[in-house]
Amino acid sequence: MKKFFWAGLICSAVLAQGAFAQEALRKAVDSSNWKKVKKIVNSGEMEEIYCGKMSAKTASDIYGKIFKQMPDESFAACPSQFAYGFGTKACGMANAANACSGVINYLLADGTKGSAKALKALDEVAKVATKTKAFAKPSLVSVDTTIWKPCPKKGAARTKCIAQCKVDANSLMAIDHDVNCKKNPEQMVDKTIKVYKPSPVFAALRTGLTDGFWKAPMSNAGTFASLAGKYAKVLSIPDSAVTGVDYVKKWASKHKADKSSLPGGQLFRFCTAWKGKVDPILSAEGFSTRCPVFKNFVDKRDKQVYKVKEIGGLNWFVENLNYNDKDGSMCYDRDDANCKAFGRLYTQEAAKTACPAGYHLATDEDWKKLEEHAGGAREAALKLKSNGSDDYAFTAMFGGYANKTGVCTTMGDGAYFWTADADADGRGKARTMFASDKDVGSITVDPSFYLAVRCVAGAE
């Protein structure tokens, strides 16, 4: 009895020590006490990895050995830090296919949301992953399926099979089999077959790179196309799925042959990716349509250049304002790369004075005119958002928002724009668009929240 008693005490002590170390680790990470974090990690007393909001580099420096020994568990615990800080190393490890696939899908998701940083990291990861021989080999897997099998030649079994042939042919709408149920009857039977399946790493890259061109914001479409072309050969991506100037030529030629108009959203995507190379293609095919024409506006305060387009009688900034108002603006997650991709987020007070001279924060009435021009609020988002048709090149991007304490959310899913107006209770009026919806919403928001800004002026 004594032995079991002492063993229980020792086990309890170890568990208690691990729990204590885990709590200490969380506190040290949350307070950015990296010296203490390293000490706890090196002691081996912690129960699980915890990254909090530490940078990818810091996480890799501290957890590097654990990341290498336990790639799947590490990615699950710290997906962002692992993907950006250790993804390239993981995708060079033959035994880390699952973790590497996770990294690729994570970076693809961020790139599709508009992160240029993610696509740069994805390129480095793809470069290593496509050279890792273990990932190139397809695997032989068992797949349950059904096949048509000839009926027995005689007896009750044949009679039963013929009846089943008609049932199967009818349920599957297999007309040929229905006709042949008397002469050459067959029935469906379950069977397990062996098939070769591409490695999850190559499959993730192949699908993600080709789909990314069409799903990502306009600003990232060209990068996705470039990456798809770069890795097309090693990933066996068919030419018909790789977008580029040749793709545009075939696209224009097909629409000419079909005598159909050019889809505005696709055209704008091509124009954004290949700029001056698209109009000559349209001209050669006899189309009068051309790439959208923008004016460039230079903000004298910081020399930033914005694209401006006339839409419905107003000159709109067709990208979010990125002027640094130190008292009332911030980058999403306080990351400068997000400002570069999505512009800055502003409190309503700051938003009202943030636009450069000659322009103003769009009013509620300005937005109403835009919505009506784009087909009404219930359908307007389809023609205004970056993952819709974007017929007017307005390019609403899903840069999310931050609450009054600076906590950010919904990047990649929602776009929130201040108007210059407020309701009777003093809450600011705002417009919203979401990646999965077709309508432009109108909401009231605490004016201390941080939303995006579009500047506008009357057309000359």
Image (cartoon, rainbow, N blue to C red):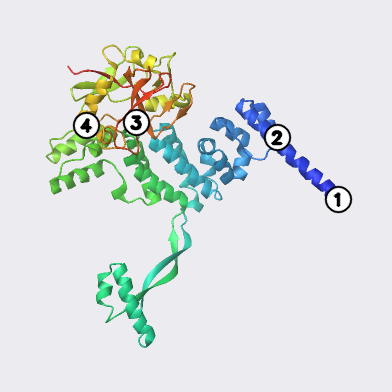
Dot 3: within a 10 Å radius of its alpha carbon, few (fewer than 14), some, or many (20 or more) residues?
many
Q: What is the number of the mark on residue 397?
A: 3
Placement of 196 over or under 167, stated as above or below: above
CA separation in Å, label 1 and label 2: 27 Å
> Looking at the image, which is closer to me, 405 or 96?
405
Give the number of the mark in front: 2 or 4: 4
**Label 4 sits on what residue type?**
Ala
- Residue 369 appears at what percent x and percent y? 22, 25
- 2 or 3: tag closer to the N-terminus: 2
Q: Secondary structure at mark 3?
A: loop
CA separation in Å, label 4 and label 3: 17 Å
Q: Residue at the spot x=22%, y=21% of the render?
A: 315
Q: Residue at the spot x=38%, y=28% of the render?
A: 341
**Residue at mark 2:** 21
Question: Quadrant of residue 419 in the image?
Answer: top left
- Residue 30 appears at what percent x and percent y? 60, 28
**Residue at mark 4:** 374
- Residue 66 appears at what percent x and percent y? 63, 41
Q: Residue furthest right?
A: 2
Q: Secondary structure at mark 2?
A: helix
